[in-house]
Image (tube, grey):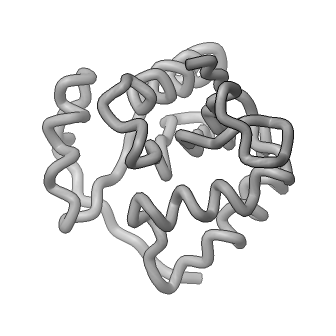
Amino acid sequence: MDLEIRPFAEPDRGALLELWRMCGLNHAPNDPNEDIDRKLAHDPEHLLVMVDRDHDNGTGTGTIVGSIMVGYEGRRGWLNLLATHPDYQGRGIGSSLIEKAEALLAELGCPKVNLQIRTSNTEVIDYYKNLGYFVDDAISMAKRL
């Protein structure tokens, strides 16, 4: 496999949306197109995709087999929307994307990385623990604007 991690490009949109759909990452009322648009308006270089250049999807850029959205607001880093194509799971794609995200955050001086897991997605908890993540003594709260 010829794999490459790179920033998202607009021709990737359809394939990225399909990847997120296949991985169960689309949750109402979130609009995945709006998630992409907001990220592109803020810091587009931190929406990363992994492509398999050996398998082209007709765009000439390879097939998207993974993604991660990286955020940093000056205090904490955030990992969002980690996805690995079901046909590619178990090949280290997710951990490679996380390593790249952590390196980007470290370059920015980020002291700690956070992520959130939906309570219905318990099977990924051990995955993150194996990568050095731990359950933080915090409660996540939200408010829709």
In this rendering, the count of numbered labels is: 0
Out of 91 and 72, give the one closest to the viewer.
91
Image quarter in which the C terminus is found: bottom right
Residue 99 lies, with reference to residue 114, above or below; the image says above
Q: Residue at x 25, y 34 (%)?
A: 128
94 sits to left or right of 14: left
Q: Which residue shows up at 49% across the image and 42% down it?
A: 78
The quadrant of the image that shows the N terminus is: top right
**Residue 82 placed where, x, y %?**
46, 45
Q: Nearer the viewer, residue 131 or 87?
A: 87
Where on the picture, by quarter, is residue 98? top left
Question: Above or below — where is 53 with respect to 39?
Answer: above
Residue 111 in sight from this viewpoint? no
Residue at 50% from the left image edge and 28% from the top image edge: 97
Q: Is residue 105 visible?
A: yes
Left or right: where 24 falls relative to 26: left
The answer to whether 89 appears left or right of 123 in the picture is: right
Q: Residue at x 42, y 37 (%)?
A: 88
Place of residue 51 in the rendered image (x, y in percent of width and height, measured from the top left): 65, 33
Using the image, determine if residue 55 lies above or below residue 47. Answer: above
Please tell me whether residue 110 is drawn above or below residue 126 in the rendered image.
Answer: above
Q: Residue 76: where, in percent of width, then height? A: 49, 36
What x and y, as percent, mark residue 119? 19, 65
Along the line of sight, the residue nearer the viewer: 108 or 56: 56
> In this rendering, would 90 be left or right of 24?
left
